[in-house]
Amino acid sequence: MTEFDKFRLYALRLFVFYRWLFAFVGIVAVILSTVFVGSSNNFNLPVLQLLIFFVSLIVVNFLPYFLLTAIAKKPSRFSITWSAYFTLIYDLLFVIVLVYLLGGPSLTSGFFFFWPILVAVVLFDFWLPIFTALTSSLIMFFLVFLEKEGFVTYFSNPVVMDWAGFDDKYNSVLNFSLLYILAGVILAYNYHLVKPVKIFKAHEVALPTEHTENNEKKEEWVRHMNEKLETAIRQLHSKDLELKLAKQQLEKLEQAKSKFISVTTHQLRTPLSAIKWTFNMMLSGQLGQISSDQETFLSKGYESTQRMIGIVNNLLNLDHIGTDQTDLTTAMVQLPELVEKVAFEFENQLESKKISLIIKKPDRQLPEVEIDPSKIRMVVENLLDNAIKYTPTDGQVTIKIKDDRINSVHPSLEVAVEDSGMGIPEEEQKKIFHKFFRASNAVAAEPDGTGIGLFIAKDIIERHNGTMWFESAPDRGTIFHFTLPLRHESKSVSKPQDQSIE
Amino acid sequence: MSENKKILIVEDDEFLRSLTVKRLESDGYAVSVAVDGESAVAAVSDEKPDLILLDLLLPGLNGFQVLEKIKGVDELKNIPVIVFSNLGQKEDIEKAKELGADDFLIKANFTLDDVIEKVHSYIK
């Protein structure tokens, strides 16, 4: 279907209307001719036959009318083309009948062949109008021939237009003029039909209507996609709500957990303090002299209590790591002093396992480091505790404090805690700093232990912008190192994970 | 040396309190006790001790509130206060310091001997 077809359909339906118009005008003309002119020989018309002709034209015209209306609902190139052929033949036939009724071929009657030629020009290409014109001429000749040979007689003399009061020359000119004017009027009126034909000769101009079927499919597809989108959006909304609720619940849970840990640990501390002090009082002899056996056992009790307090403290710290604790309260500290204080705490344990502890530090006075003393204290405690725990009796623990200022970019001090213990198995070494991880041999030697000590220790060191690492050989011992820069680079120390360096 | 020095202990746990009292008395201090916030404030203004050992978790008025009250009174605000608690979170220590506490000890982390040392250092 092209623009041209659409146009042709329009033209065809217009022609239906023209035929009715023509029939109506014809009827009026015939009636008028009887009224005004009487039955003079000049306009000798077979009135009755003509009336019948026009009426039947009106009636028969309904056929193309309905046909074209039906075609208009579902137009196609095929139906339109054949309608055009049909119309042409149909019009030709009617013109032949009309010519017959008007007394055979004559100037006047021959004029009516103009109509099928116009139809052909509008509906078809170059050749068909030419062909139509030739056919019309042939028909005219044929009709004359028939008359001459006597096959046909016409109803009347050929209608000739003789205007009363004009002589022949003027008469002819008048007739011609009338024809020209009529032709001109008809053409002009139908120019809007003829002109666009040229434009629409571009048959390739495909109409969107060509794709009416595709259009419907597209619309359906769009509708379908819209439905899908709407469903997806609805699902996203409900998922979003779900996630919001889940997040709220998690936050509540987190708060509840924090509260629980906080409350529990504080509650635990009170009786633990009582036990610790009781043991301490007894051990110090304030409640009377104690035997060495009593002392041994009381010491064990005291140590266990210390352990428990340590675990409770760790739990609290762990919970704090969940909350945002990025600032450290720093002070200028003499590192060797801190180390020695911690070592003092472990005297009992060292003695009971007969492990000797050596602290090595450089001869020169070391500079103070800017650190959070309580946190670094925890780190040293943790390392020393591990060293003692995992070293058998008669073992050796060495703490070395080194001055790292000379060889490194950032001036710092290094602390190394070395033991002669069981070491860390190679396969498990990379997990040693993980939360809650304990090496298998550690668990075997010491069932008690949370596995968070090293995790916390590493975190603290890193928050000081230092580094922590270790070397270990199974059954030979382990050395844990950490460095502490002398100065903090920035006021608020953010966790290394927060910085997108690695 | 420690004669006539009065120490007020505000502590709601009976056992811990008695242990602390015993220890301080054996060192020659005069010790009085308060078991909750209200009576603590009253005791401070009545007795005007030379040092206060103040627990934070107390029935009724808590330690922070007691601290605030004491430090708001002119004649009382110069008495050294050692906060003595098992609350050990940073916010708590900060808050206590802000309200005017002179020191903060976590009971579970110190022995009574450590406590005595601290007391000595503040009462001079």
Image (spheres, grey):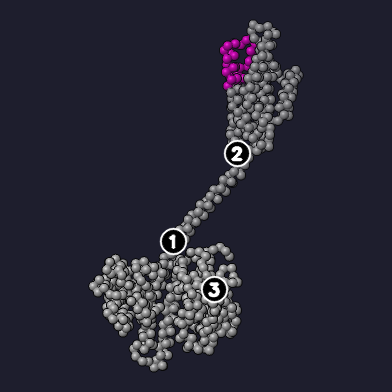
Q: With A8 as the anchor, is A252 left or right in this view? A: left
Q: Amino acid at mark 3?
A: Leu
- Residue at image point 39% right, 79% down: B110
Seen in the picture, residue A289 relative to A218 is either above or below; the reply is below
Could you tell me which chain the residue with mark 3 belongs to?
A: A
Q: Quadrant of residue A257?
A: bottom left
Percent across and percent down for residue B68 are 31, 67
Q: Which residue is mark 2?
A: A74
Foreground of the two, A265 or A3: A265
Q: CA distance from mark 1 to mark 2?
A: 57 Å
Seen in the picture, residue A28 relative to A239 is either above or below; the reply is above
Q: CA distance from mark 3 to mark 1?
A: 49 Å
Q: Quadrant of the N terminus of chain A?
A: top right
Residues marked 3 and 2, same chain = yes
Foreground of the two, A391 or A213: A391
Could you tell me which chain the residue with mark 1 belongs to?
A: A
Q: With B18 as the anchor, is A394 left or right in this view? A: right
- Residue at image point 32% right, 71% down: B63
Mark 1 or 2: the one toward you: 1
Percent across and percent down for residue A187 are 65, 22
Q: Amino acid at mark 1?
A: Leu
Tag of residue A245: 1
Q: Which residue is mark 3?
A: A413
Region rendered in magenta: A24-52
Q: Residues within 10 Å of mark 1 (few under 14, many from 20)?
A: few
Q: Is residue A262 magenta?
A: no
Residues marked 3 and 1, same chain = yes
Report helix, strand or loop for mark 3: strand
Foreground of the two, A147 or A420: A420
Which of pointers 3 and 1 lies earlier in the amino acid sequence?
A: 1
Residues marked 1 and 2, same chain = yes
